[in-house]
Amino acid sequence: MPVLESENNTPYETREEMQRKGPSARWFWVFWIVLIGLGTTAAYLYSNHLKEQVVIQLQEDTNRQMASFKSEYDQRFNELVQELDEMQSQVQSFNELLTFTKDQASGKTDNSNKLYSQLSEVEKQLKELERKMELLK
């Protein structure tokens, strides 16, 4: 029996002692693995939530800017249309005045030439304004 006593005095733990300590260590590792999994899942879901919020904010900002650009474009277009109408009325009045002057002119062509040069200048401006309107369309 001396051999048996030497085996019992060994500093090693028996299987029974290891099994008693084993489950507590196993539950510790299971707890940490579950905790890490929950943390990873929460981080993933939160990042998706933030991404959706950023996309929604960008869409709202884009829509606001587009509305602003459209209103500026409409305002500028209306101004050009108004200028075009004014120019057309000036051209019409100059045409009438030129026709009247040609009919009434005897030997004085100086006034007729001035009106004609003014009319051609107004027509140039009208063409330039029409070109600008075409660019806006």
Image (cartoon, grey):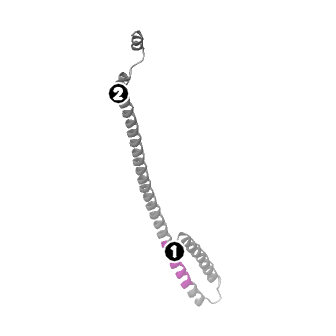
Q: Residues within 10 Å of mark 2 (few under 14, many from 20)?
A: few
- Indicate the secondary structure of the residue bearing disc 1: helix
Asked if residue 43 is positioned above or below residue 96 in the image, the reply reads above
Principal secondary structure, stretch drawn in magenta:
helix
Decide which of 76, 50 is in the foreground and name it: 50
Q: How many marks?
A: 2
Tell me the kind of residue under disc 2. Answer: Ser
Q: Is residue 8 left or right of residue 127?
A: left
Q: Position of residue 36 (x, y in %)?
A: 40, 36
Q: Position of residue 55 (x, y in %)?
A: 43, 53
Which portion, as a residue range, is magenta?
Answer: 81-97
Percent coordinates x, y for residue 13 in the rendering: 40, 19
Q: Residues within 10 Å of mark 1 (few under 14, many from 20)?
A: some
Image disc number at residue 24: 2
**Which residue is located at x 48 percent, y 72 percent?**
82
Q: Is residue 45 above or below residue 10?
A: below
